[in-house]
Amino acid sequence: MNTFFNLSDGLFVYLWWALPVALAAILAKTHWLRNFTARFAVNVRAKCLLDDKTYHAFPNLDVRCGGEHEQIDCVYVSRFGIFVVNTPNQQGRIWGDDGSGMWTRKLHKNQARFENPLLKNQQYIQALADQLSVSQKMFYSVVVFPKHCYFQTMMPDNVLDISDFKEFVAQYDEVVFTDEEVAEIRASLETSEFDVVFNRVGLSA
């Protein structure tokens, strides 16, 4: 009996300390979870806004960039060009411009800096253009924030919230790729082997 009570006392003491620690960990992750959910919602809605027979989506596309393998939030391949979409994991008020290395986000009392998504997109475009042998002129960079982000500085036209995404893409209505070229690019991006992917396509502007 004494052994039982000793074990119970030990368990109670453990829970007394463990539960607050677990609760603190959950609260600490709440901001990350909220941002992750926002990014997921943006990506899903963006995909729903576009005709999937015209704009072929490649979410979470792996790319070799500066000697490293990185992941692009989404790439859309179409006859009208290749759209490279960055969906920052940010909410609240946003400060930034196209030339700054870092942007600022403030949500309630929390403030943080994050890498300029336009500069990151340019790295992705350069990597894809080189690896696919496609002119950079065929790529369009766009940064899409969730609706509950509020820009505090004047942003370039290609930085927008999700409600403007379809209109942004639709403005590019000049055909720059044939159906065969689109199919070839898609086939390359669907290949998982990097050395194969980026040596199969040889398109030029």
Image (cartoon, rainbow, N blue to C red):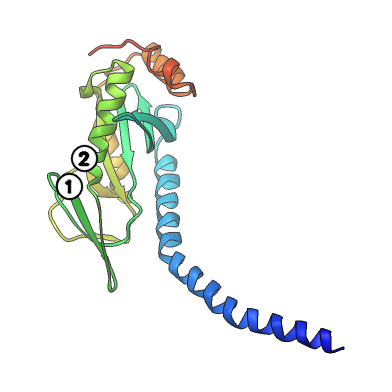
User: Disc count in the image?
Assistant: 2
Q: Which residue is mark 1?
A: 101
Name which quarter of the figure residue 75 lies in: top left
Bin the neighbour count of mark 1 within 10 Å (Cα to Cα): few under 14, some 14-19, many 20 and up.
some
The answer to whether residue 146 is visible is: yes
For badge 1, the amino acid type reads Gly
In this view, the residue farthest toward the right is 1
- SS for tag 2? helix
Name which quarter of the figure residue 98 lies in: top left
- SS for tag 1? loop
Which percent across, then down, holds residue 203?
Answer: 30, 11
Bin the neighbour count of mark 2 within 10 Å (Cα to Cα): few under 14, some 14-19, many 20 and up.
some
Q: Are marks 1 and 2 in contact (CB under 8 Å)?
A: yes
> Which of the marked residues, 1 or 2, is nearer the chain's N terminus?
1
**What residue is drawn where x is 49% and y is 24%?**
192
The answer to whether residue 80 is visible is: no
Label 1 to label 2, Cα distance in Å?
A: 7 Å
* Left or right of 13, for residue 101: left
Q: Quadrant of the C terminus?
A: top left
Name which quarter of the figure residue 188 lies in: top left
**What residue is drawn where x is 43% and y is 32%?**
57
Q: Which residue is mark 2?
A: 119
Depth order, front residue of 1/186: 1
Please determine whether, in this image, residue 29 is positioned above or below residue 200: below
For badge 2, the amino acid type reads Leu
